[in-house]
Image (spheres, rainbow, N blue to C red):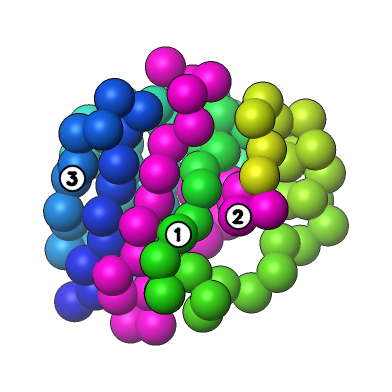
């Protein structure tokens, strides 16, 4: 089972064992991670699940699809490693991924 580290804007960390196939948004919400909202319910229709994907495991992520990229263009504080948590399904390749929440969603 892959392990994901969620880092809240204030620095609190959540080390979570995740079932493959779950989205980062759903996992963060289920574990009460501060700084992720998911207002659209995971439909890639907003950017309130904006995250920064970090660490070695981030290299296993494919590039964002066009609809995700369009939403990220409207996100606050975008970075090169910005992604939408609703669009990333956890796999073994993401074991050890660090998911940092941006300060804009607190």
Q: Which residue is mark 3?
A: 14
Question: Residue 53 location in percent, x, y?
Answer: 49, 56
- Position of residue 65 in the picture relative to residue 103 (left or right): right
Q: Which residue is mark 2?
A: 81
Q: Earlier in the sequence, mark 2 or mark 1?
A: 1
Q: Which label belongs to residue 98? A: none
Residue 47 sits inside the magenta stretch? no
| SS at mark 3 in the image | strand
In the displayed structure, 29 sits above or below 76; it is below
- Residue 67 lies left or right of residue 51; in this view the side is right
User: Does the magenta portion include 104?
Assistant: yes
The one nearer the camera, 10 or 99, is 10
| Callout 1 secondary element | strand
Circle 2 Cα neighbour tier, 10 Å, few/some/many (<14 / 14–19 / ≥20)? few
- The residue under label 1 is 54
Instruction: Give the CA distance from mark 3 to mark 2.
Output: 20 Å
Marks 2 and 1, how far apart at CA? 7 Å
Identify the residue at horizontal 33%, vertical 82% (top origin). Answer: 92
Report whether residue 94 is seen: yes
Looking at the picture, tell me which residue is in the foreground, 30 or 85: 85
Q: Nearer the viewer, mark 3 or mark 2?
A: 2
Element on which disc 2 rests: loop
The picture places residue 9, in percent across and down from the top left corner, at 36, 28
Residue 97 at what x, y percent from top left? Answer: 35, 65
Q: Which residues are magenta?
A: 80-106
Name the mark nearer the viewer: 1 or 3.
Answer: 1
**Horizontal and vertical percent position of residue 27:** 30, 49
The mark nearer the N terminus, 1 or 3, is 3
């Amino acid at each position: 089972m892959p392990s994901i580290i969620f880092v809240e804007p204030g620095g609190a960390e959540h080390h979570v064992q995740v079932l493959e196939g779950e989205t980062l948004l759903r996992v963060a919400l289920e574990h009460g991670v501060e700084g992720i909202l998911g207002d659209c319910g995971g439909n890639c229709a907003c950017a309130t699940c904006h995250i920064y994907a970090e660490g070695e495991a981030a290299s296993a992520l494919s590039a964002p699809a066009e609809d995700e990229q369009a939403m990220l263009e409207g996100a606050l504080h975008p970075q090169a490693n910005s992604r939408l948590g609703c669009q990333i399904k956890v796999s073994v390749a993401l074991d050890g991924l660090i998911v940092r929440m941006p300060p804009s969603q607190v």
